[in-house]
Image (cartoon, grey):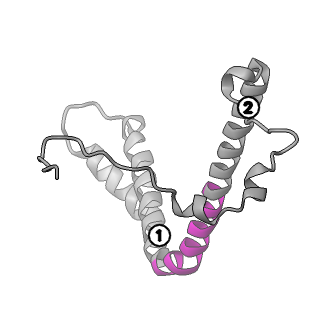
């Protein structure tokens, strides 16, 4: 009897696999009349490959645009329904403050027209205060 050593390859018999054992001889002898081979890139024309890549890129771009538009519509709905009613009073205050600041800037730009001599006599400040009082009334 032979002793097996761990480093020596073992001689194995080829046993039939489960699929081979279950197949019938009639089924294994039947060959298709025409074999269909998938086309690989090297057998396809350059125009065909370019057209497939163009269609794939265009469909991906259109899908991205569609998802982006759905996202924008959803954000608009959420903003107009929930967030805008909460911040509307603050927006009114903000717009009123901006209008007041713009009118003050117009009055400050009008001070050189009042005859400011730059001497610092205090007359120009008094005139601006008078105009502000008139504007507030």
The main secondary structure of the magenta stretch is helix
Residue placed at 88% from the left, 42% from the top? 33
Disc 2 secondary structure class: loop
Asked if residue 71 is among those painted magenta in the image, a careful observer would answer yes
Q: Could you tell me how far apart the alpha carbons at marks 1 and 2 are, in whole angstroms? A: 64 Å
Tag nearer the camera, 1 or 2: 2
Q: Nearer the viewer, residue 123 or 34?
A: 34
**Which is nearer the N-term, disc 1 or disc 2?**
2
Disc assigned to residue 91: 1
Asked if residue 60 is among those painted magenta in the image, a careful observer would answer no
Residue placed at 13% from the left, 41% from the top? 7
Disc 1 secondary structure class: helix
Q: What stretch is highlighted in magenta?
A: 68-86
Residue placed at 39% from the left, 59% from the top? 132
Is any atom of residue 60 visible in this view? yes
Residue 124, x across and y down, in percent: 29, 44
Residue 56, x across and y down, in percent: 69, 39
Is any atom of residue 137 visible in this view? no
- Residue furthest to the right in view is 33
Q: Nearer the viewer, residue 54 or 118?
A: 54
Q: Given contact means CB atoms under 8 Å apart, are the residues at marks 1 and 2 in contact? A: no
Task: Kindly identify which residue carries mark 2.
Answer: 39
Residue 80, x across and y down, in percent: 59, 74
Q: Which of 72 and 3 is in front in this view?
A: 3
Tell whether 109 sits left or right of 24.
Answer: left
Disc assigned to residue 128: none
Residue 108, x across and y down, in percent: 37, 45
Up the image or down, 45 lies above or below 106; here it is above
Within 10 Å of the Cα at label 2, are there few (<14), some (14-19), or many (20+) other Cα atoms? Answer: few
- Residue furthest to the front in view is 1
Residue placed at 43% from the left, 74% from the top? 90
């Amino acid at each position: 009897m032979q002793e097996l050593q761990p480093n020596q390859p073992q001689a194995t018999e080829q046993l039939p696999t489960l699929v081979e054992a279950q197949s019938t001889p009639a089924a294994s002898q039947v060959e298709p009349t025409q074999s269909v081979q998938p086309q690989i890139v090297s057998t396809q024309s350059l125009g065909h490959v370019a057209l497939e890549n163009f269609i794939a890129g265009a469909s991906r771009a259109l899908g991205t645009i569609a998802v982006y538009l759905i996202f924008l519509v959803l954000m608009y709905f959420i903003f107009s329904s929930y967030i805008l009613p909460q911040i509307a009073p603050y927006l009114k205050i903000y717009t009123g403050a901006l209008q007041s600041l713009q009118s003050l800037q117009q009055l400050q730009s009008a001070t050189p027209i009042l005859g400011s001599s730059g001497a610092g006599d205090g007359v120009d400040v008094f005139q601006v205060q008078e105009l502000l009082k008139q504007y507030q009334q």
